[in-house]
Image: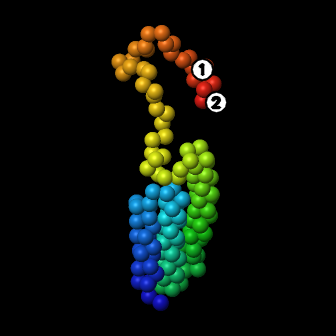
Amino acid sequence: MHLAYPAVLSALLFCTGLYGVLARRNAILVLMSVELMLNAVNLNLVAFDVWLSKTAQDTLHSGQALTLFTIAIAAAEIGIGLAIVLAVYRNRGTSDIDKLRDTAETDDGDDSDDGHDAPGSAAPTTAEKAEATA
């Protein structure tokens, strides 16, 4: 088999994954698209390893070893990523990426922009802030 066939298939898989990352709004679909991109890289690694081992009579197979390492890292990444997405979904009620972009706490508008506190309001101390975040 020629090297062009797996290279073209890998390029198509990578472009499909890139489109999924850029166009999707659901966090789980974005994670699946990242996995598709990693699988395209793995296909390239194995194809070039086989091609180079035929030409150089190399028995090291470093491309295949790197592929196994990439698969292990991808499994850990998807496990942690899915746990984060589920935790965010439980807290926010959505996994839409556009709605999750602003994760900072917002002001209620009680403070003025010039840095002075409004009359009659006391600034919270660091202990009160720590209790509120705990």
Circle 2 sits on which residue?
134
Q: In front: 131, or 7? A: 131
Which x, y percent locates residue 38? 51, 66
Q: Is residue 47 above or below residue 129?
A: below
Residue at the extreme left of the image, as rendered: 114
Q: Is residue 79 above or below residue 99?
A: below
* Quarter assignment of residue 11: bottom left
Helix, strand or loop status at disc 1: helix
Q: Is residue 17 above or below residue 3?
A: above
Image check: 118 left or right of 31?
Answer: left
Disc 2 marks a residue whose amino acid type is Ala
CA distance separating discs 2 and 1: 10 Å
Which x, y percent locates residue 95? 53, 52
* Quarter assignment of residue 116: top left
The residue that appears at 44% across and 88% down in the rendered structure is 2
Q: Are marks 2 and 1 in contact (CB under 8 Å)?
A: no
Disc 1 marks a residue whose amino acid type is Glu
Q: In front: 114, or 58? A: 114
Residue at the extreme bottom of the image, as rendered: 1
The residue that appears at 51% across and 15% down in the rendered structure is 123
Asked which colour scheme the image uses, the reply is rainbow
Tally of numbered discs: 2
Which x, y percent locates residue 122? 51, 13
Residue 128, disc? 1
Confirm whether residue 114 shows in the render.
Answer: yes
